[in-house]
Amino acid sequence: MKLELSSEGRYALRALVYLARVADRGDLVTADRISAEAVVPRRLLARVMAKLVRAGLVESIEGRGGGSHLALPPDKVSLRDAVEAVEGPFEITHCIMQQRPCGHGRPCALHDAWTEGQNAILQELGTKTLADFSSQAPHFH
């Protein structure tokens, strides 16, 4: 079973963890610096950052002297917030047992167990914040 993020989801987390590391300085960080330090391809960074800005997780200022910083303290941004800002809501979209969306009217035999698993993942992602990881991972690879 694969449970993985898209490239954009992974790059968003890298950018956010990097911004969390430098958040206490209050500096605006340029896109070039985020790209280099968080190892995020520059061509994808703009798209990822735009989604994070729309979600209210990052503030960006354009032009000379501009850059980006977290819009909230690192301990107020959960991994769930970060992932859903880029990936959209996490949900199991296809029923394993039926050829229709599950849970509408007559859920399949696995529906409740699958829903419990999904809720456990979402709960765990909701309890972990950028602050939990900003000091743990000293280097991006």
Image (spheres, rainbow, N blue to C red):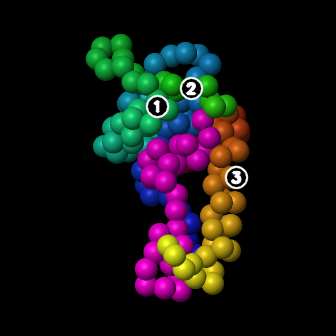
Which residue lies at the image location 43% right of the left edge and 80% below the top edge? 100
Do tag 1 and tag 2 residues touch (Cβ < 8 Å)?
yes
Horizontal relation, residue 60 to residue 115: left or right: left
Which residue lies at the image location 30% right of the left edge and 14% below the top edge? 64
Which mark, by number, is residue 72?
2
Alpha carbon distance from label 1 to label 2: 8 Å
Instruction: Indicate whether 17 appears above or below 125.
Output: above
| Residue type pointed to by label 1 | Gly
Which residue lies at the image location 50% right of the left edge and 48% below the top edge? 84
Which mark, by number, is residue 27?
none
Along the polypeptide, which appears first: circle 1 or circle 2?
1
Instruction: Indicate whether 24 appears above or below 104.
Output: above
Residue 94: in magenta span:
yes
- Quarter of the image containing the N terminus? bottom right
Foreground residue among 12 and 110:
110
Within 10 Å of the Cα at label 2, are there few (<14), some (14-19), or many (20+) other Cα atoms?
some
Res 34 seen here: no
Alpha carbon distance from label 1 to label 3: 21 Å
Residue range highlighted in magenta? 77-103
| Residue type pointed to by label 2 | Leu
Which residue lies at the image location 54% right of the left edge and 80% below the top edge? 106
Which mark, by number, is residue 124?
3
| Residue type pointed to by label 3 | Glu
Provide the residue designation for mark 1.
Answer: 56
Within 10 Å of the Cα at label 1, are there few (<14), some (14-19), or many (20+) other Cα atoms?
some
Within 10 Å of the Cα at label 3, are there few (<14), some (14-19), or many (20+) other Cα atoms?
few
Outermost residue on the top side: it is 65
